[in-house]
Structures are given as C-alpha cells and as structure tokens.
Amino acid sequence: MLNILEINNIKYKIKMLDIEEFSTKLHKNSRLMGIDPGKKRIGIALSDENRKIATPHKTIIKNSFSSFIEDIKKIIDEYNIEGIVVGNPINLDGSDSQSSQSAKDLAINLSKNISKPITMWDERFSSDAAFNLASNLDINTSKKIKKLDENAAAFILQGVLDFLKK
C-alpha cells in the first residue's frame, strides 16, 4: 500500500519530504519558516538561525495564490529561509481531515513554486494552544484572534525545532 508521500511523488511528480529527509537537507545554521494553513488567513512563523526558537512573524491574508507565493518568496529572501514546515491538521485519531487535504495541496503547490525543502508536521491543537496562551497573557479577544494564525504557526514550527534537536 502506498503512503501519502509516495502518492504525491507519483501523482504530482513532486518530492514531499518526511521530517527525517527534510532534516538532512538543512545546513547547520539555517532559518526555517512555519506555516499554519487556512483558507483565507495563513500564519507565518520564523526560527532563529540556530533553530532553537520559533517566533510568530505575520498573518498573510490570501487573496490569490500568486500574491501568496510572492509574499512567501519575499520572506524567504529577506530572512534567508532554508526550509518550510506546513502544518497538517489531522484528526485526533491520526486520520486525514478535510483541512488536511487542503494543507497537503498547499504544500504541493508551494513545492511547485519554491525550491526550498518542504515538509508537513502534525498541527493538532496548535490553534487551541495559541489561543489559550494568549488567554493567559490577559490579551483582549480581538487581539488574540488577530494573532492566532501566526501564533499557531509558531507552535507548529517549535514542534519541528524541538524534534530536530533530538
């Protein structure tokens, strides 16, 4: 039986990297980008060069895919990003959700337009965790929601950074 990486390789002729292979494509001191995918709002987080800390960067409002790609390319160039992690919103039981397919499509389309290594990472609870953290910081609800996507992207990216340290 084929796994999702093999299906993507066959169907789209694209090499989607698993986390182990992704890690081999990175230089020792390189920055990563985390993406919390959404239909309209896409959270972006960046790591430091030592890949220890993920920091929320911005939320991109996606009006068109081409403008989204241009925004991503600008961030890659400005911050010297060497790899991209896209959050994969799988179900609690580990199965794919409807949003999971959208996230995979986003990752595939990114890989068609950007030559950096791209992988996906389980993002279960990232939005909840980001919202709850903001609740503990006594921030009003409108500010919590405004920063939710980029904070969720930071949770996703931090999970990868912690994994890569092992």
Image: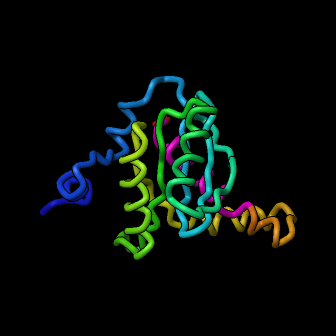
In the image, 131: left or right of 36? Answer: right
Measured as percent of width and height from the top left, residue 153 is found at 60, 54
Measured as percent of width and height from the top left, residue 152 is found at 62, 59
Image coloring type: rainbow
Residue at coordinates 53% horizontally, 41% vertically from top-left?
161
Q: Quadrant of residue 62?
A: bottom right
Measured as percent of width and height from the top left, residue 124 is found at 50, 66
Residue at coordinates 82% horizontally, 71% vertically from top-left?
142
Measured as percent of width and height from the top left, residue 132 is found at 72, 67
| Magenta-span inclusion, residue 149 | yes
Residue at coordinates 41% horizontally, 76% vertically from top-left?
98
In the image, 146: left or right of 156? Answer: right
Q: Nearer the viewer, residue 90 or 112?
A: 112
Q: Quadrant of residue 121?
A: bottom left
Residue at coordinates 54% horizontally, 41% vertically from top-left?
73
Q: On the rendered image, what quadrant is the N terminus found in?
A: bottom left
The segment highlighted magenta reads: 147-164
- Looking at the image, the residue that sits furthest to the left is 1
Q: How many marks?
A: 0
Q: Nearer the viewer, residue 136 or 152?
A: 152
